[in-house]
């Protein structure tokens, strides 16, 4: 009986105290914008980027950030080396191989390139019309990301 109580208590706390970050796809954004207009934050990353992984495990696990992103923005976590075709803004973007099992997705280049180069991680903010309004290429701590979110809402 004591174990059952502890189990129910633990699941009750974890279900109410910790919410998941809603990760949308590019294909969903147009229909979501028709329901409610919001800015979209695209987190462009790779599996080999240490700073990208740190943002995934620290910044995007912060409960305040999760709640703010879920309630006020659309969020897309996008692997720049994604190999599937993606249709976004009435255009189809493809993976561009550049060697043996190496390459980059055209959409990552479209959204993440600054000064003719891409450096990970990239945060790209799109307005309600899917136009780039902000780009940032560097690690952001939870504290700095909260400041960015506040400025984006002004």
Image: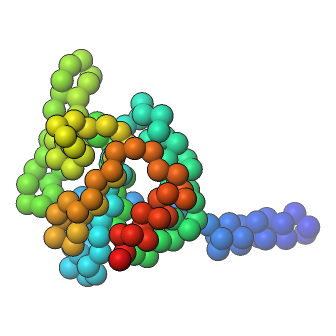
The foreground one among 151 and 130 is 151
Question: Residue 143 location, x and y as percent?
Answer: 55, 59
Between residue 55 and residue 101, name the one nearer to us. 55
Residue nearest the observer in this picture, 138 or 79: 138
Check the image and name the residue furthest to the top. 100
Which residue is pictured at 30% across the width and 65% down the height?
40
Is residue 37 shown above or below 1?
below
Outermost bottom residue: 35
Q: Quadrant of the N terminus?
A: bottom right
What's the colour scheme? Answer: rainbow
Q: Quadrant of residue 137?
A: top left
Residue 27 showing in the rendered view: no
Vertical placement of residue 45 versus 22, above or below: above
In this picture, residue 47 sits left or right of residue 99: right
Q: Position of residue 4 (x, y in %)?
A: 84, 67
Q: Residue at position x 28%, y 81% from top?
A: 36
Quarter of the rendering containing residue 84: top left
Q: Residue furthest left?
A: 90
Please provide percent x and percent y for residue 107: 19, 46
- Quadrant showing the C terminus: bottom left
Judge from the rendering whether residue 140 lies leftward or rightward of residue 64; answer left or right.
left
Rendered residue at 29%/70% (across/down): 39
Residue 106 in the figure: left or right of residue 122: left
Q: Nearer the viewer, residue 141 or 56?
A: 141
Count of numbered tags = 0
Residue ID at (33%, 61%): 41
Q: Does the image show residue 121? A: yes
Horizontally, residue 104 falls left or right of residue 72, namely left
């Amino acid at each position: 009986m004591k174990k059952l109580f502890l189990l129910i208590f633990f699941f009750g706390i974890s279900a109410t105290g910790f919410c998941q970050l809603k990760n949308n796809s590019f294909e969903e954004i147009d229909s979501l914008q028709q329901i409610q207009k919001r800015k979209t934050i695209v987190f462009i990353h790779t599996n080999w980027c240490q700073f990208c992984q740190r943002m995934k495990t620290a910044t995007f696990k912060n409960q305040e950030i999760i709640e703010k992103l879920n309630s006020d923005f659309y969020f897309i976590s996008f692997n720049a080396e994604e190999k599937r075709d993606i249709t976004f803004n009435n255009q189809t973007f493809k993976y561009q191989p550049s060697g043996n099992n190496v390459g980059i997705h055209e959409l990552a280049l479209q959204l993440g390139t600054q000064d003719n180069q891409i450096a990970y991680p990239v945060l790209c903010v799109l307005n309600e019309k899917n136009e780039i309004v902000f780009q940032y290429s560097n690690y952001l701590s939870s504290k700095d990301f909260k400041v960015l979110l506040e400025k984006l809402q002004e």
